[in-house]
Amino acid sequence: MNIALFGYGKMGKTIERIALERGHTIVAKIDFDTTDYDLSSADVAIDFSIPKEAFNNINLCFKNSIPIVSGTTGWLDKYDEAVANCKTNNGAFIYASNYSLGVNLFFELNKQLAKLMSKFDAYEVSLEETHHTQKLDAPSGTAITLAEGIIEQTSKEKWSLDVTEDEKTIPIISKRIENVPGTHVTSYTSEVDEIEITHTAKNRDGFALGAVIAAEWLKDKKGVFTMKDVLGI
């Protein structure tokens, strides 16, 4: 399979290595300052660029009939427009805040725990996420997905990037520490105890592998999908 890469930072280089290990070919490496590239031989594209470039990269792929897997966060105010453009162009698109297979299982565990805890008012829920200092957006897209999963199952209505006394709001604490690939914690705290679930990434390989697996799955398909479709969960 021929893959075009949008974004050639640390994640892009990790995706390249894993894609090559899985027998694929990288036919284009497009960074924010790349002006000369050819997408004509690409079977699929993977975008791990920067927030201000992601939407344009996605639409470029739709116009060129290239299925695209996007893992860039921080641009989701235009997500609905991207979905509409995908349908208009009969394209293929997967967006995920996190492509790690373990994190996507964690998303489902988070929802199940939220459903159980929704019956017990004594517990207050909060989220904490820690990433490397190069991460541009806060909170992480993964933390937002976790918050949305909790909102779906409980009486919570929104999230906030701060400690809050609003009982309808989930507080998210974001930390940036050098060389941390990504740690996410969901906590339920009462006056007598605390329940936590945690996902800790050991390196970037899990994110990259999931993105390549998603690209393999998306090739030759049409429509808008999620990692739940890819993993069958």
Image (cartoon, helix red, strand yellow):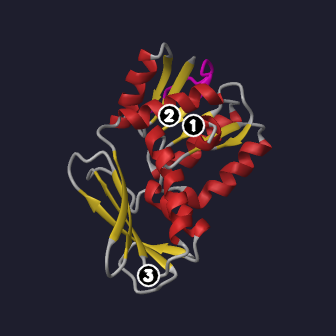
Q: Nearer the viewer, residue 198 or 94?
A: 198
| Magenta residues, dominant SS class | loop
Disc 2 or disc 1, which is closer to the eye? Answer: 2
Q: Are marks 2 and 1 in contact (CB under 8 Å)?
A: yes
Gap in Å between the C-alphas at discs 2 and 1? 7 Å
Q: Left or right of 129: which side holds 212?
A: right
Can you tell which quarter of the image residue 149 is in? Answer: bottom right
- Say whether residue 76 is visible: yes
* 100 over 168 or under it: above or below: above
| Residue found at the very far front of the displayed protein | 192
- Label 2: how many Cα within 10 Å (few below 14, some 14–19, many 20+): many
Image quadrant where one finds the C terminus: top right
Task: Please report the residue visible at 50 percent of the width from the left and 77 percent of the height from the top.
Answer: 120
Q: Tag 3: residue type?
A: Ala
Q: Nearer the viewer, residue 101 or 21?
A: 101
For marks 2 and 1 on the same chain, the one whose residue lies earlier in the sequence: 1
| Residue found at the very far left of the displayed protein | 178
